[in-house]
Image (spheres, helix red, strand yellow):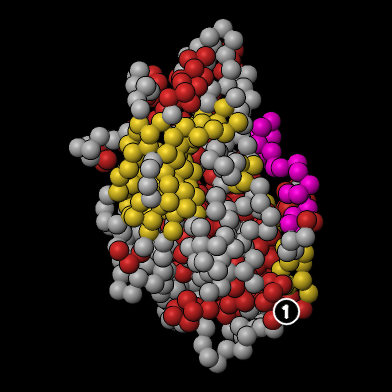
Amino acid sequence: MAFVRRNVWELGGDWAEPILWYARGVKAMRARALADPVGWRFYGAIHGIDQDLWRQLGYLTNGDRMPSAADQRIYWNQCQHGSWYFEPWHRGYLIALETIIRDAIKDLPNAPADWALSYWNYFKPGQAALPPAFASPNWPDGNGDNPLFVSQRYGPNNDDNVFVPVDQIDENALGDPDFIGAANGGSPGFGGPRTRFSHGGSVHGGIETQPHDWVHGLVGGSDPETNLPGLMSDPDTAGLDPIFWLHHANIDRLWQVWRTNPASHQDPPDADWKDGPAATGGRRFVLPLPGGTSWTYTPAQMSDFASLSYTYDDTSAPAAVPQAVARLELLGAATAARTAPMATPRNVELLGANTQSLRVVGADTRTSVALDQSVREKVANSLRAVATAQPAAPDRVFLNLENVRGKNDATAFRVYVGLADNEDPATHPEKLAGKIALFGVRKASLPNDEHAGNGLTFVLEITHLIDAMHLAGSLNTPNISVRLVPTHPVPEAAEVSIGRVSVFRQGR
């Protein structure tokens, strides 16, 4: 049977049948003990668990019996972030959850055999608000134990008004032709850099950075009184929120949207990706299923979409000129060059960096990046060459915020490049480099974490800003300014810091 995942806002009502059955399945899973492998909390812990945080948020009590050490070792803390396994691991996670929900509702009267998860496409006009069935503590009949509602959702303004501000998210990753990214300052790719098993890698891929990370932080927010995160704001609690699964269904859908251009947008052919981390001695991707069974899967199986048991009602790509083509046109490339896209250059080289770490506090943080003259000239030459008779692929340029540490995953910034000290960022959107959300930063800052507390590294493509400087004749500057503007002032208690701000060229 083929299951169809549909847009939650287009099901025909706030409590349309697919959502009503989802709520019933979630209720059944929530009634199960923590140690039950197909229980709601057990499945949340598969994504990640911090026992102290769960206790503070009321999801773990002294009366809970913990699963066996073997079950915890096999199943828990398994999600892949900052990794080229991000998409395939989460795809399997969604499929397994659907299987459990179907099993949980199958004996209820009139249960649909073809039930499937819905997805939340916050990009569509009028669909950025939290779906109503998740926003009320009541079922449609007024009964007040709606399992889709959680109190620990605070929204982008931490005022319990939950929605996704569409001006803070984007689908730019869909334009990246490469799945695999660099871990040394260049493009992180659509899917992320090569890793082994990575429960919390340092560099997030393009689709993970935007919109994945941002939606997590915007929906979850943080408690304005205790500063505790909303469930969606922290990887160690996100799987406990029922809206998590609709958000990730949309991210999974976007992977399929990206793949609709098979001429350039292809999943990795590497055996290390196809076979997963277990093939090189790492952990397996394995999830518990009903009846005491388990399912082990590989990225190759998740990449073979046609063989999977589900599809989406809409995988059409956003209507836009491909970024690479638009760029070549802007830089003056001949029509022939624009219609025959050039190979993406892969060599990565440091263009410049600031001289000291930054402590991020308040509403505005600034630094300056000194540019190496010889490397800057390489960039300029590559841009000038586009308009010649024998054009080559121009350099791409990336801003890196390295070793970002902190205690609040709901922190988010707009990052601007080239603003003068007296310029208001709000009046200069043309100088916006991009947006970052610190989803996962708390865990990445712990000294006992897998990357030794080194924090996260965020990569923003600033090619469009460098192109604009080139066209304006101002690329000969010895340094460029970088300004971070948070969505809300960052308190001292968040302890957010940036080890280094750097700029890299990726070219020939």
| Residue 275 drawn in magenta | yes
Locate residue 85, reporting x and y percent: 66, 53
Relative vertical location of residue 458 with respect to residue 380 in this rendering, above or below: below
In the displayed structure image, the side of residue 55 where residue 314 appears, left or right: right
- Residue drawn at 37 percent across, 21 percent down: 476
Q: Quarter of the image containing the C terminus?
A: top right
- Residue drawn at 62 percent across, 31 percent down: 346
The total of numbered circles placed on residues is: 1
In the displayed structure image, the side of residue 78 where residue 469 appears, left or right: left
- Residue drawn at 74 percent across, 55 percent down: 276
Q: Residue 113 appears in which quarter of the rendering?
A: bottom right
Locate residue 446, reporting x and y percent: 50, 66
What is the three-letter code of the residue carrying label 1? Ala
Relative vertical location of residue 270 with respect to residue 299 in this rendering, above or below: above
Q: Residue furthest left?
A: 422
Locate residue 172, reporting x and y percent: 50, 39
Residue 15 appears in view: no
Q: Quarter of the image containing the N terminus?
A: bottom right
Q: Which residues are magenta?
A: 259-278
Q: Residue 184 appears in which quarter of the rendering?
A: top right
Residue wearing tag 1: 70
Residue 338 appears in view: yes
Q: Residue furthest bottom?
A: 63
